[in-house]
Amino acid sequence: MERRDALSELFLSELATNPDFEPNFYNALAEVAQDVLTIEKNDKAYAAARVLARLAVPDRILSFRVTWADDAGEVQVNQAWRVQTSNAIGPYKGGLRFHPSVTQDTLKFLGFEQCFKNALTGLPMGGAKGGADFNPRGRSRQEIMRFCQALMAQMAPFIGPDQDVPAGDINVGTREVGWLFGAWRQRRGMFGGAFTGKGLSFGGSKMRVEATGFGVVYFVACMLAEMGTSLEGKRVLVSGKGNVATHAAQKAVEEGAKVLTLSDTGGTLLAEEGLTLDAIAWVQARKDAGEDIAAPPAELGLRYLEGQTPWHIPADIALPCATQNELDQSAAEILRDNGLMLLAEGANMPLTPGASRVMRLAGIAVAPGKAANAGGVAVSGLEMTQNAQRLTWSAARVDETLRDIMERIHRAVVAEGRVDGRIDYGRGANIAAYRKLADAITAQGVL
């Protein structure tokens, strides 16, 4: 936050004195404001329309009480929200998550970020986020299904293909999306692309599971090309063992990189000679079975480093794909000292503020999540397109279009991010997305 100027400080100070001050949302807004407020000030149309001030207030926040019965017949009560941030460039679009930590503040912050990420794709998608404080851990399959149906009883009137199109997120996978979509279909008496991340048998898209991880690697390939090099032979650290991590590792290997790690909460899986596709498939199978990766078969050539993260291992590229704030200042300093070339965020906000500062001062290129991991929502947008056309695309066509989208995002970010002979990817992403949103907002009048 060291880059704030007087203009952004004034804008943010007005928010901080609001009695409904929300710290997570404030921090997300501050990160964007420091990059775009000067752009807004210097454009008469943007300034007159007060674009950022309008984006700072969601179009609406829907709050629901969700009442359902558990397997013992006891009544349970949860709270849910849908934050519809902006539909200036398309229907509201963003995931639903189930977790006891879900709050309105968190969803407001995520919806704001989603607006900018969706704008970067170039597809007609607005921004939203939703969720409930429901904890599925320890709940039966029937209980989770009943909760999904009870939630959709409240939310269905506000959801639709041209209105608001949710997707999965934390604890909401293909199974839960199926239950939510089924409840929506029954309530509304129609079939349409009201959700993405659906099963292939009822309108889902091929490549949706792979999209985020593959997209990260396509973006990294563009960054390296900008530097005059390629993925061939580059040493890559990947954290996590979920869909984003394993598919990023898979695509990096296919592109010629030497992927050294995957990880879980207990430690790091190290392949000194580089992960093979067989090793990655083993990790995926263990994850799908709900099992740890601490005891790999000897023939895979892997070592499990208990209690360690990947970040102490010398490498050229880091892809944090596990969780928020997973890479702290001390880890960033080790990566810097080991000669890291670049970092791309596969997870959302995986760097702590201290880590971001280390990377910035060292001049290490960092691709923010709103650009680097936009592949997931991009393929969600392609699922919406297929649903509207009543067509199903081949995996090859989806993958080719995904690569084109990630290359287009990179070009837009680079065009806005060149500063003093280097590329500030964070600034470039914020400005490129802001311009897309601002042009739409100013063209549609004062609403």
Image (tube, rainbow, N blue to C red):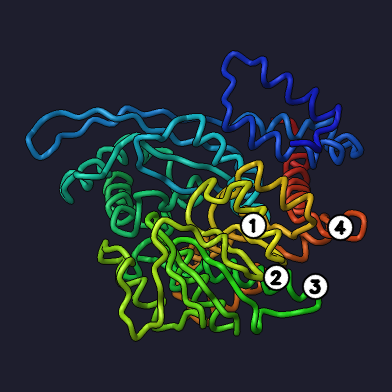
Q: Which residue is mark 4?
A: 418
Q: Which residue is mark 1?
A: 334
Q: Earlier in the sequence, mark 4 or mark 2?
A: 2
Q: Report which quarter residue 7 is drawn in.
A: top right
Q: Earlier in the sequence, mark 2 or mark 1?
A: 1
State how far apart marks 4 and 3 are (Cα): 13 Å
Mark 3 packing: few (<14 Cα in 10 Å), some, or many (20+)? few
- Residue 206 vertical placement versus 40 (above, below): below
Q: Give the residue at x 51% y 68%.
A: 211
The three-letter code of the residue at mark 4 reads Arg
Query: SS at mark 2?
Result: helix
Which of the numbered marks, if any, corresponds to residue 407? 2
The three-letter code of the residue at mark 3 reads Met
Q: Is residue 157 left or right of residue 425?
A: left
Q: Give the residue at x 53% y 66%.
A: 238
Which of the numbered marks, if any, corresponds to residue 245? none
Q: Do the numbered discs 2 and 1 sit on residues whose CB atoms are within 8 Å?
A: no
Q: Which residue is mark 3?
A: 227
Q: Position of residue 39 (x, y in %)?
A: 86, 41
Q: Is residue 203 left or right of residue 286?
A: right
The three-letter code of the residue at mark 2 reads Glu
Q: Give the residue at x 57% y 25%.
A: 22
